[in-house]
Image: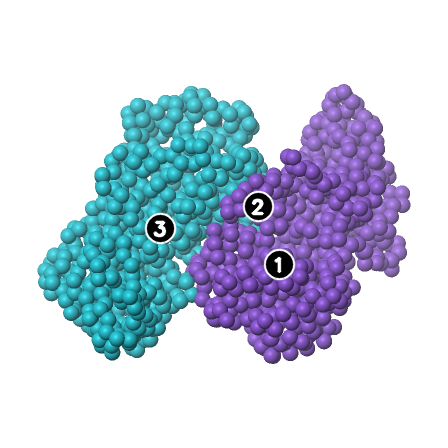
Chain colours: A cyan, B purple
Amino acid sequence: MSRKFAFLFGVHCHQPAGNFRSVFEKAFADSYRPFLKAMLRHPGVKFTAHYSGPLLEDMQNRERGCWDDLKELIGRGQAELLGGGFYEPILTVIPEEDRQGQLRMMSDFLAEHFGSRPRGVWLTERVWEPSLAKTLAAAGAEYTLVDESHFRAAGVADLHARYLTEEEGFSLSLFPIDKALRYLIPFRTVEETAGRLAEIAARDGLAVLGDDGEKFGLWPGTKRLVYEDGWLERFLDFLERERIPTLTFSEALDSRPAAGRAYLPPASYEEMMDWALEPEAAERFEALKRRVRTEDLRFLRGGSFREFFLKYPESDHLRARMFSVSRRIRAGGPPEALPDLYKAQGNDPYWHGVFGGLYLPHLRESAYAHLLRAEAFLAPGAAWRKEDLDWDGADELVWQDGKFGLFLKPSAGGSLVEIDHAGSFRNLTDVLTRRRESYHSAKPGPGEAGLSIHELSKTLPPEFERYLRCDPSRRRSWVDRFLGPETSWTNFRDRDFEDFGDFSEAAYEAEVQGPLVRLGRRARVRTGEREVGLSLEKTVLPGERGVRFATSVVNDGPGEAPLVFAQEWNFYQIPGELRIDGERIFLCGGRLSLIVRPKPEIWTFPLETLSQSEEGFDIIHQGYGLLTVWRLQMEAGGRFEAEAVLGESLEDPALRRDPPSGPRASGG
Amino acid sequence: MSRKFAFLFGVHCHQPAGNFRSVFEKAFADSYRPFLKAMLRHPGVKFTAHYSGPLLEDMQNRERGCWDDLKELIGRGQAELLGGGFYEPILTVIPEEDRQGQLRMMSDFLAEHFGSRPRGVWLTERVWEPSLAKTLAAAGAEYTLVDESHFRAAGVADLHARYLTEEEGFSLSLFPIDKALRYLIPFRTVEETAGRLAEIAARDGLAVLGDDGEKFGLWPGTKRLVYEDGWLERFLDFLERERIPTLTFSEALDSRPAAGRAYLPPASYEEMMDWALEPEAAERFEALKRRVRTEDLRFLRGGSFREFFLKYPESDHLRARMFSVSRRIRAGGPPEALPDLYKAQGNDPYWHGVFGGLYLPHLRESAYAHLLRAEAFLAPGAAWRKEDLDWDGADELVWQDGKFGLFLKPSAGGSLVEIDHAGSFRNLTDVLTRRRESYHSAKPGPGEAGLSIHELSKTLPPEFERYLRCDPSRRRSWVDRFLGPETSWTNFRDRDFEDFGDFSEAAYEAEVQGPLVRLGRRARVRTGEREVGLSLEKTVLPGERGVRFATSVVNDGPGEAPLVFAQEWNFYQIPGELRIDGERIFLCGGRLSLIVRPKPEIWTFPLETLSQSEEGFDIIHQGYGLLTVWRLQMEAGGRFEAEAVLGESLEDPALRRDPPSGPRASGG
């Protein structure tokens, strides 16, 4: 047997904290349970496994068979468990204190229930930044796994060895994951996998697999392939029969010296670095990758995970909210609030690639619910907070009185980016802006046949093109618009209208007077062939009975003006939760109401997106776009006043919503 | 005048703490002094300046004219001062505590002497990593300047605006430096610069210059251009006459809203990202850059600053030593040790590009001197410390008794990577390995005429090729070698010999017994047509009278063997400092001696490198390579014993060395 060669078999299993119960059950039945049973039958094959916190808790409470099998495998010395952030956060995008807290929570859990602290860490989505070496080492970790592409980017030639890196002198071992093994296992024959192992053995290297455990049974088609057709059994037989040396990662750490030091750039697996780019950039990057020689690929850099926050303002906002909660807990909140904060940090709703992620409303809803539960531990304020929540250099105004939460953005149309109903732990405005994704149209490269969306999926409804309509800017609420007299409901739905004013994106003056915020802006709007000046003033006043949003429009002239004044709202409501009755808009199946006076025309439409998932394309109901419309004939100097009052509804208080249904996420 | 356009005129001035007095004087006379005088004559032109700590201290102590002029300019509101790490460290490669310490030291200095704390920071060599946003914001900085290439890499289109970035929610403003202005000023006509400003004004952007102040008078040819020929006067006249709006950076911060958020990858200016690469990679990267379309350049990634530590083990070792000192100061050392530590963190000797940097012995010497001065504040140990100083996964053994410092690397030939003489604050082994640099041979690309080194420089001596000899591995001391009987002094000098053993790079067993370290290794060496086994044992014993290095070689057979056993040392000694008398090797002009017994043949040669600097190529004396050689005829079972004793010499104690002479560095 060679001096150094060994196969390091690592699997990572994860389901997001907010995922459906049924997904957890299916994942255990089809994948996690039979995988461990198979390993039990092959004591000669060592392996290393990572289960994220939600899975460990589920195992502990409901999947005792798995729990016991895992203990047995660890007791035998056949299995090692990896640590990680308990609720599977992307470590680089949460506060350092929470990184340490989540890593410690996992370490404590494993020490308590499985007898020892983990020496290694599974790096969520393998999102690496140089500063992580310090974070992980400070948390007691000795090693982690990253993709070979991380190493290629650093110019490292030998990808089958352990490396060291350091940050500020904090040292950490890194194992590069072999991409070929990731693609072979379990989709190609055992013989092909054996061939790859033989290649690595011939170079006397370490053959490292670190991949989603869900590919053993949960991914489409793999239950049959891996278990019914016996792939895994044949593979484990082969490893035992051929006496392929297998090691846990800690054993490799102790017995295989590091091949050198490496400094990896910020990176993740290759696919994610494409997903983080805007569609146009992603297309150019793909084309460039095809043109560049293999040995020069190391000089290419795709997107970084942080760019998801620039690409998706909703992801950015969720993160900004999460930071705000974290900051306030650290500033004196009770530690009881931490588990909810940590759950809200789980990576899934913060990004989007081939998994639904951000596009899945139930994952976003779960994240906001946990943030609001965490905030319930904090003392409610009785004042507006000025805070540059989203790091854009302009202060937001935040009100959180324990009943409603209001996040007002004077710099962006004096509009609301979040309205929370604390009693139901819901962000009522948690919708998604419709935007172009690169998979919406795969253009052919030069001399190359491209695939259209028609060919990519056969299951799209005939009218799918309506789901490709894009919104020019982020969907917010209480947005002031001036429409043309011909603008219709369908124009609004299709975002196919001109705004004759520029109030919707402009900065408003803001003034706080006790519980009242006064927002104001003067500007010109077009009316027919000419322009008039308008003074728009809005006030927000939260009170005992709810929140009053008042608006006044004054025609500064010159002359009389016909105006179609409208205010846009966007509500995260599943079908049936939103109902309109005259000037009353019922939310949450009647629990809340927004009463708008004077009685406007109310236009509403279901906001739907088209996104990709493992199985194909999903059309997802993200909520409702809603417009209150007033047709005005305003004299010079004339004033129009309107109000909207949001409050607990006196009607149907017992009416509670069902959990929203939608496409299901399977993690990994 | 446009709403937003303004010219932000930033200059950065720096000389390394260890640079020659004469360089400081010339820099003030030719550049810093006349620059400030010119600004005084043009009160209509606002500017922002950064002076590194060594310059501020020099101004305060010796250049009172400059000091007063600067105060006058600040008092007028015409100038703003930037902060930064006091001794101009690359912030990403020093410990966070020292980042904060150096930034605070500068902030305190400016507050004390110039009336207010700086709001912005000059980022040394513009070396950016994402984590810096937190570091700088935590230090109270509101903004910094980076190159437009940083922004291009992040896919940002509008390069003439202020941006925000954040790390863990710590927010920082970033100003992109216009590359065109950097190249125009002052090398092209004022009219061309005016043209560039007009272009930026037409787009209503911010025209940001942030560049070395030394280009105004100190860089070759610029004294004449800028002052004698009047470029600067004409430029300032133009700005005043045309009423070009100029702002300090803080004024721009307060009056110009951020254009958005950006997440920059680790980067510096483009040239440095080439320099950090190994020559072969640098050539491929250059070729790739030429092939790629301009709009796709954002997807290219060169080297990162950290790669200098992989490229130059001597830079890596200096940093490792610096970290070790920093750690020990933090663990209870007196704060009086900090200024020397900070001085040792100045960036210049840690890297090499077009400035001499690491290649300049007087800068390395200065860095080690400051580290040893800092260590003089720490309690000397009376024991060997085990420490993985250089983060390679193998422990070094360190002895520091206040007289000598020994850094033993059992894993690399049981050799020494550093020997310090505390009394003279010198690292006696601070030499440089001879290595290939990409500028040593510029190969022609496909279909392209290349420049040879002959064409690149006319001033090279005819025998320059001898300076291009490379060493296959890092130069260490007390390295065990077995030579062929024909190997000569010139073979040793030219590194043109075969080592018949593999002791020089192999791992030795190490055992610490009180003050004694025992190193051992058994292996085979070639002798004639066959091999014999050898047991090599070495011991190091520091004592009152000096340090004894003892070696024993035992022939384990089979049979008798003729062997040429040699031990290699490398000493940082200027010409005249090293002298050989029989078995005695005098160092430091006689102050120290290494007595080697039995009397060996001693081969020595001046270790010289060929490196580039602003003016062309420098041949630099880096010290001496030295080999002690014994020709042995060893019976089976026979033993050979040798020793080398390093101690204060009884001879010529008054003989002190002159400061070393060498090429001069001008900073920037």
Give the labeled residue for mark 3: A350
Measured Cα–Cα span from mark 3 to mark 2: 29 Å
Tell me the quarter of the picture where residue B212 sits: bottom right
Give the residue at x 13% y 59%.
Answer: A580
Between A594 and A386, which is closer to the camera in this rendering? Answer: A594
The three-letter amino acid code for the residue at tag 1 is Arg
The three-letter amino acid code for the residue at tag 2 is Gly
Decide: few, some or many residues near mark 1? Use Cα within 10 Å; few <14, some 14-19, many ≥20. some
- Left or right: where does residue A609 sit relative to residue B516? left
x, y percent for residue A392: 41, 63
Measured Cα–Cα span from mark 2 to mark 1: 21 Å
Sequence-wise first label, 2 or 1:
1
Furthest residue in direction left, as rendered: A652
Instruction: Indicate which disc residue B302 carries.
Output: 2
Decide: few, some or many residues near mark 2? Use Cα within 10 Å; few <14, some 14-19, many ≥20. many
Give the residue at x 66% y 61%.
Answer: B189
* Chain of the residue under label 2: B
Label pair 2/1, CB-CB below 8 angstroms? no
Instruction: Indicate which disc residue B182 carries.
Output: 1
Give the residue at x 57% y 63%.
Answer: B197
Please state which of the two labelled residues, at mark 2 or mark 1, is closer to the viewer. Answer: 1
Please state which of the two labelled residues, at mark 1 or mark 3, is closer to the viewer. Answer: 1
x, y percent for residue B64: 72, 75
**Badges 2 and 1, same chain:** yes
Q: Secondary structure at mark 3?
A: helix
Between B87 and B578, which is closer to the camera in this rendering? Answer: B87
* Chain of the residue under label 3: A
